[in-house]
Image (tube, rainbow, N blue to C red):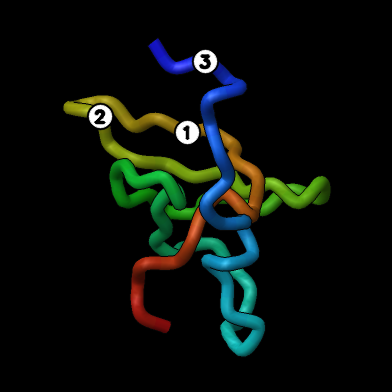
Amino acid sequence: MIRLNDLIRVASGEAYQDSREPGLTIGDIVMLNSGGPRMMIVDILDDGRVVAAWRDGDAVVEHSFPRLGVHRVSPL
């Protein structure tokens, strides 16, 4: 079992972002920095979070994530 005190930070969220890259927009395909399914940005909230949607079987799931927690995987 891993305890919180056993975890170490290996990179900051900013490490996944390039200042030359434009900000995320609705329709961009992203992935969590920790991995997972490809998701589409469906909303950008005023508090710096993004709402992403992805398919889970026949269902479409939406969830909000901190902007620094996702990175673009689709070409510009």
Instruction: Give the residue drawn at x 53%, y 25%.
Output: 6
- The answer to whether marks 2 and 1 mark residues whose Cβ atoms lie closer than 8 Å is no
N-terminal of the pair, mark 1 or mark 3, is: 3
Q: Which residue is mark 1?
A: 62
Q: Amino acid at mark 2?
A: Asp
The CA distance from mark 3 to mark 2 is 29 Å
- The answer to whether marks 1 and 3 mark residues whose Cβ atoms lie closer than 8 Å is no
Side of 12 where 35 appears, left or right: left
Say which quadrant the C terminus sits in.
bottom left
Q: Which residue is mark 3?
A: 3
The CA distance from mark 1 to mark 3 is 29 Å
Up/down of 64 relative to 76, above or below: above
Q: Which residue is mark 2?
A: 56
Q: Nearer the viewer, residue 40 or 15?
A: 15
N-terminal of the pair, mark 3 or mark 2, is: 3
What mark, if any, has residue 54 been given in the picture? none
Instruction: Give the residue drawn at x 29%, y 44%.
Output: 37
Q: Amino acid at mark 1?
A: Glu
Side of 6 where 59 appears, left or right: left
Q: Nearer the viewer, residue 9 or 45?
A: 9
Instruction: Give the residue drawn at x 19%, y 27%.
Output: 58
